[in-house]
Image (cartoon, rainbow, N blue to C red):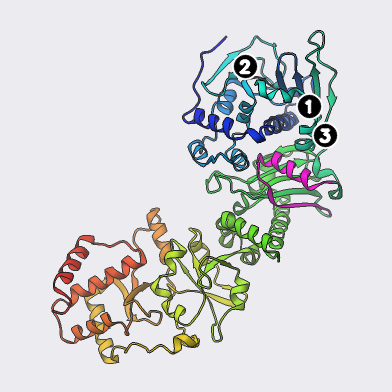
Amino acid sequence: MSETMQPFEADVGRVLDLVINSLYKDREIFLRELISNASDACDKLRYESLSRPELLGTDPDLEITILADAKNGLLTIADNGIGMTREELAENLGTIARSGTARFAELLTGDARKDVDLIGRFGVGFYSVFMVADKAVVISRRAGESTAWSWASDGRSGFAIEELPTDSFKRGTAITLHLKDDAKEFLDEWTLRRIVRTHSDHIALPIRLRLIKADQEGDEPSAPEQINEGSALWTRPKSEITDEQYKEFYHHVAHAFDEPFARVHFNAEGLLEYTALLFVPTARPFDLYDPRRAHGVKLYVKRVFITSSLENLLPRYLRFVSGIIDSQDLPLNVSRETLQQGSVVPKMRKAIVKRILDELKNKAQAEEQEAKDKYLAFWTDFGPVLKEGLYEDSENRERIMELARFRSTHSADGWTSLADYVGRMKPGQEAIYVISGESHAALRNSPQLEEARAKGVEVLLLDDQVDPFWLEQVTEHAGKPIRSLAKGDVDLSAIEKDAAEAEKPEEPATEEGDLGRLIAKLKLALGDQVADVRESKRLRQSAVCLVAGDQAMDMRLERFLKSHNQLDVLAKRILEVNPRHDLVRRLATLAKDDTPDFGELAHLLLDQARIVEGEPLPDPAAFGRRMSTFVARGIGT
C-alpha cells in the first residue's frame, strides 16, 4: 500500500539544503551517524528482550551490516535491532530538531568544521546522508510486529511511507543510499574499512562488510567480514586506548561532532563495582537551558544497555555530561523504579560527581595560557549551568566555587577566580563584595559600587540569571563573608583609599542637622513607599540609590520571581542619599525652607533611584509630569 508524498515540517527543507551544501569536506561523517543509530537500535532491543525474550526470535545475535553494491551504486547499512513502526518512521525521520530547526538554520556559517559541530548539537545527523545520496530508502520492521514499512525521500521535496507485504523484511532497519556520482568512493572496500576503523571501531557489536563489485558476474554479495574490533571501549585498559579512539567514542555516545573538553574514565572497586567513561563537551548544546534537557549518560549492566533516562544518576547542573556507566552489581532485569528508589545509584552518583568536578578543577588550574583560555571558553558556555549546583548541591558547593570564574572591576574584560580575588583583597577588607544585575557592563556604572571603586576595592559583577539564587544560599567562601553592595548597611571606612583617590578634595557634606531634617522630611513625604531613608556610605558621584535590607531578598531575585508570578508585590526598598552631592545639599535647603514642592521633589528623587536600579515605576505618568514641571522652571525657582 503506497502513500502520497508528505512534506517535511516547516524549515526542514531549508535546513536539509544547508546541511547538504555546507559540509562537503566532512561528508564521510554520514556513515558514522548511521552506524551509531544502528548501534542504539540494537542496544534498545537487547534491553527490551530482557523482559520479552521472544522479541529476539530466531535471530538473537545482534549485528550491523554494510553492503556496498558498486554494480548499482547503492550503499546499505542494516541492523537487526529494535526497528520502527510507521509512526516512528514519520516522527523520527520526518522532523529535524523539533525544538530548534529555525535556530539551526540561523547558526549555519558555511564553515564546514563549525557546521559539523552544529549537526551534533541539533540532532540532525541522519540527514547528512543527503550529502552523498540523491535518494534514501529506509525499510524497517519493529521487533514483535509483522508489518514492515518503507520510508523514501530525496531530501528536498518530502517523504513517502509505504506498507510492505507481510514478512517481506526481517526485524530491524536497513537504510539504502542511492549515491551521487561524486560519492562513489564510499563503495570502495578500503575507504569503508578506513572510515569504520577511524570512527566506529569502538562499537560493541560486530560490523560486517559485504561487497558487490562493479565487474563481477551476478549480484551475489561476498561473504560478510567483520571490520571492527567489536568490544566495548570502556572495558579495555586505558593504556591501550588512544585519544583518537576516546574522541570517536564521545562522538558516538553523545551524538556530537565537537572535541570533548574533558573526560573521566575510571573503574570503581569495593562495595560497588562499575566502570565509568564520561565526557564534558566543548560546544554548548543548543537545548542546554531547556527544562526537558537531561544528561546523556547511559547505564549498562555487564555491558548490556539498560537505560539512558535515569535522571538521578547525575544532578541537573551536570546535564551536559554524556558517557556510560557499566555496573557489575545490578541485576540485568533491574527496573527503572528500583534504580530510582534504591541505594546503589545515589552511591554511584556521589563518586561520579566528585570525579567530574575534580577533573574540571584540573582544567581550571592549568598554568599554560592556551589551557587557561580553553577553560574560560568552557566556563563562558557552561558556567551558568554549573552555578546551579551552588544552591542545589551543598555537599559539593566548595568544589564548584573553586571552579567558578567571575567578571570583576579588577579588569575591563577579564575573569577572576575567588582564590585570586581573595589574594588581591586590600588591607582592612574583611568581605568578598559582589553586585548582581542584568549585564556586567551596566553593573560597572552602578551607583552602589562608587565608594568601593574609590577605595580600589574589587567587586564581583554577577550577571547570570542564576546568580541571585545561589547568593541567597552561599554566604561565605574561604572564611570570608560574601556581601552584596546592594543589600544591607555597607561600611568600607576601615579600608584605606588608593593614593590617587586620597589626594582628591572631597565635596563638602550637608550639615548634620540639615541632613537629619532632610531625611525626616523625605520619610514623611514618601511614607510607605520606602522601608527607610538614610545617609549612604556607598555613594560618591550619584545623589541617591536603592538598597535592600540586611535580611531582605536580593532585589534582582525579587523582580525575577514577581515577573514569573511567584511574588505578588516587591518589598519596600531603602532609599539612601549622598550628603556630598549638590542635589542633596540643595534639597536640604529646600527642606529647611518648607518649600511647597518638596513632596513632588521627593517622589521624583525616588523614581530616579528606581530607574537606575531597574525597578518599575508605579506611576510613569506622574513621573513624566513631575520631570517636565521641574525641568521647565528649574528646581528651587
Q: Position of residue 298 (x, y in %)?
A: 70, 42
Task: Locate residue 301: give its quadrant.
Answer: top right
Q: Earlier in the sequence, mark 1 or mark 2?
A: 1
Picture residue at 31% right of the left edge, 65% below the top: 611
- Amino acid tagged 1: Leu
For disc 2, the neighbor class at 10 Å (few under 14, some 14 to 19, many from 20) is: many
Judge by depth and name the residue closer to the eye, 225 or 569.
Answer: 225
Q: How many marks overall? A: 3
Q: To which residue does mark 3 refer?
A: 230
User: Nearer the observer, disc 1 or disc 2?
Assistant: 2
Dot placed on the residue nearer the N-terminal end, 2 or 3: 2
Whether residue 441 is situated above or below residue 190 in the rendered picture? below
Between marks 2 and 3, how big is the CA–CA gap?
29 Å
Residue 412, position as x, y percentages in the image: 50, 68
- Under mark 2, the amino acid is Ser
> Where 153 falls versus 192 (above or below)?
above
Left or right? Give the position of 629 relative to 491: left
Residue 64 drawn at (x, y percent): 76, 26
Residue with the mark numbered 2: 150
- Write down the region rendered in magenta: 241-269
- The residues tagged by marks 1 and 2 sit, at their Cα atoms, a distance apart of 22 Å
Circle 1 sits on which residue? 62
**Residue 306 lies within the magenta run:** no
Can residue 601 be seen by looking at this rendering? yes
> Which residue is painted at 78% across and 43% down in the image?
245
